[in-house]
Amino acid sequence: MIILLLICMVIPVSAVDYTVPEVPDQAQGLLPEDRDSFAEGLWYVIRTAFDFVQPDIARCGRVAFSVLAVALLTGLLQSLDGPGKRMVGFGGCVTVGMLLLQPVGAQIANARETVTQLSEYGKLLLPVMTAALAAQGGVATSAALYGATIAFDAVLSGLIRILLMPMVYIYLLLGLMHATVGEALLKRLREVLKSLMTWSLKTILSVFTAYLGLTGVVSGTADQTALKAAKMAISGMVPVVGSILSDASEAVLVSAGVIKNGVGIAGMLAVVAIAIVPFLRLGVEYLLLKVTGSLCKLFGDGSVAGLVEDFSTGMGYLLAMTGSMGLMLLISLMCFLKGM
């Protein structure tokens, strides 16, 4: 009777197969079929992403060459004696603005779409990671990580899309107006806007990294040489906020050794695949505008060079926004993997 009673009380148990959500179509083409190794999968994503970016390098090069030609012609005409020097400078700035506004506007739209995709994909992926961690006994840890990550994701993505992206447009408009008109008030307004964008990004990411430090997520035994290299790479790769994000790089190195399950590998690679092509496109545009601005200072008109520098600064902020969103999601996933 006891044996029969025990048999009736048996509860069926089965393993749960956690799978990551489907990624957008463009990112799907970057993912490898074999996702057993994170290092090999990451290298495949990076190598494939460069194939997508090659046409953008040629396009950005043509735009940079055109801007440099306008700057040289403007500087040459202004060196001649005549009453129309001011109009020549005005025409040069307007021409450069027309050359740069279309590609930069496309990059702003691209960055906005990337931030939205990362945020939406994080909302689908994080519940899977939370359930996987809770199934291993980390119920309280998974709930705390999920709540904090979703909150930071919502604040950062909303801040970027609603406030900071329009600020980039206004910043570029103020830069164009200052280059053509030369009004000192426009320059001060541009600097105030620049400081506000920098402060907003740094504040939210400082709170995020402080939260990781308080919860002990970034503590570990990462190799100091590798840690130093990772901090230098992240700090130099992401403008404006790279130094803040580099403080959380130890979480990446410590957790890299525990990325052994399929959900961890697939989730990390999916996030990288979504972010890497837009990030590389922004990076190419940013670097070429930096180089073009430096050359314009040497051979061209000062107002045109300042305008190109303003556009490169705007691209740097877009790069910072996209990189911040992607790295914050990656570090959050590492936190889940470390708890497993």
Image (cartoon, rainbow, N blue to C red):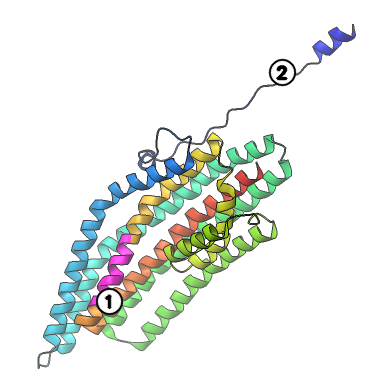
**Is any part of residue 161 visible from this angle?**
no
Mark 2 surroundings: few (<14), some (14-19) or many (≥20) residues within 10 A: few
Question: Do the CB atoms of the residues marked 2 and 1 lie less than 8 Å apart?
Answer: no
Whole-percent x and y of residue 151?
Answer: 61, 54
**Which quadrant holds residue 72?**
bottom left
At label 2, which amino acid type do we have? Pro
Q: Which residue is mark 2?
A: 12
Mark 1 surroundings: few (<14), some (14-19) or many (≥20) residues within 10 A: some
Whole-percent x and y of residue 278?
Answer: 36, 53
Whole-percent x and y of residue 334?
Answer: 58, 48
Q: Is residue 181 above or below residue 142?
A: below
Q: Which residue is at the front of the view, 128 or 227?
A: 227
Q: Main secondary structure of the magenta part?
A: helix
Horizontally, residue 1 falls left or right of residue 195, namely right
Q: Which residue is mark 1?
A: 294
The residue under the point 41% across, 84% down is: 188
Which residues are drawn in magenta?
284-295
Which numbered circle lies on residue 13?
A: none
